[in-house]
Amino acid sequence: MGFFLLNLSLTDLGSICTTVPKAMHNSLCNTTTISYMGCAAQLFFFFFFISAEFSLLTIMCYDRYVAICKPLHYGTLLGSRACAHMAAAAWATGFLNSLLHTANTFSLPLCQGNALGQFFCEIPAILKLSCSHSGYLREIGLIGVSVCLSFGCFIFIVFSYVQIFRAVLRIPSQQGQHKAFSTCLPHLAMLSLFLSTAVFAYLKPPSISSPPLDLVVSVLYSVLPPALNPLIYSLRNQELKDAIKNMITGFRVNKKVCLLFCITFQM
């Protein structure tokens, strides 16, 4: 799990660095421009990291399934070589998926201007500017294939967690159940957040689509999951919990000191 968390952290860092710095630069410089090649690079790397992240989340689900349902076979099924191969497959899948979508999207002629209405380059915003019906249908077909593959991963995740919860409920001690659930809940929370925001961003009905809503949804699925992912997984670290408690306690003490100082000063 630690090895897969390292890879997941790299995807989170990559997706954040792909979109947020340019958006901050535009905001500070009071501009809204990006070059054509910069837009293509941004779309490629963002889609690459997002695709790799979903593959890694699926692999991490399998890791939890083997650890809880087949603990005696864990070393055999998930040795260092197997983990390296699965991580490499996740990165390769993300690269291929991103390459196909980027090449097809930027082969479309644009006839609806060049204003995206988003804070970064994403496929739905670019497709709205296209005037090629065949290219548009080709990209929709690629998105459909990606959705089908993602749905297959989703079915595998659901099946794995059904088996995990059945195995956990058979554990006789409540302490053992709590320990097993605590290893799965961070992954399940991250997966739910990632899927819910991404599905709503790409599959929301056109009737409810509007520029402000599209912008908010884009922020939710592109920034929120990568930003919250380290926090969700780090909350299982006891040292981090103690540090947060000490920080909160220190804040309360400092607040009381400031209050007493203000009262004394007024007197």
Image (cartoon, rainbow, N blue to C red):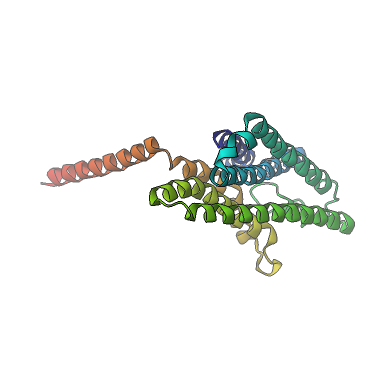
Foreground residue, 80 or 71?
Answer: 71
Foreground residue, 38 or 186?
Answer: 186
Asked whether the viewer can see residue 222, the reply is yes
The residue lying at 48 percent from left, 55 percent from top is 169
How many badges with numbers are in the image? 0
The residue lying at 63 percent from left, 34 percent from top is 76
**246 with respect to 53 (left or right):** left
**Farthest residue, direction right:** 134
| Residue 134 lies in quadrant | bottom right
| Residue 247 lies in quadrant | top left
**Farthest residue, direction top:** 81
Asked whether the viewer can see residue 112, the reply is no
| Residue 72 lies in quadrant | top right
Above or below 159: residue 102: above
Above or below 25: residue 154: below
Q: Residue 128: x, y in percent?
A: 77, 57
**245 with respect to 144 (left or right):** left
Q: Residue 187: x, y in percent?
A: 54, 47
The residue lying at 70 percent from left, 56 percent from top is 151
**132 with respect to 89 (left or right):** right
Foreground residue, 259 or 9?
Answer: 9
**Farthest residue, direction bottom:** 207
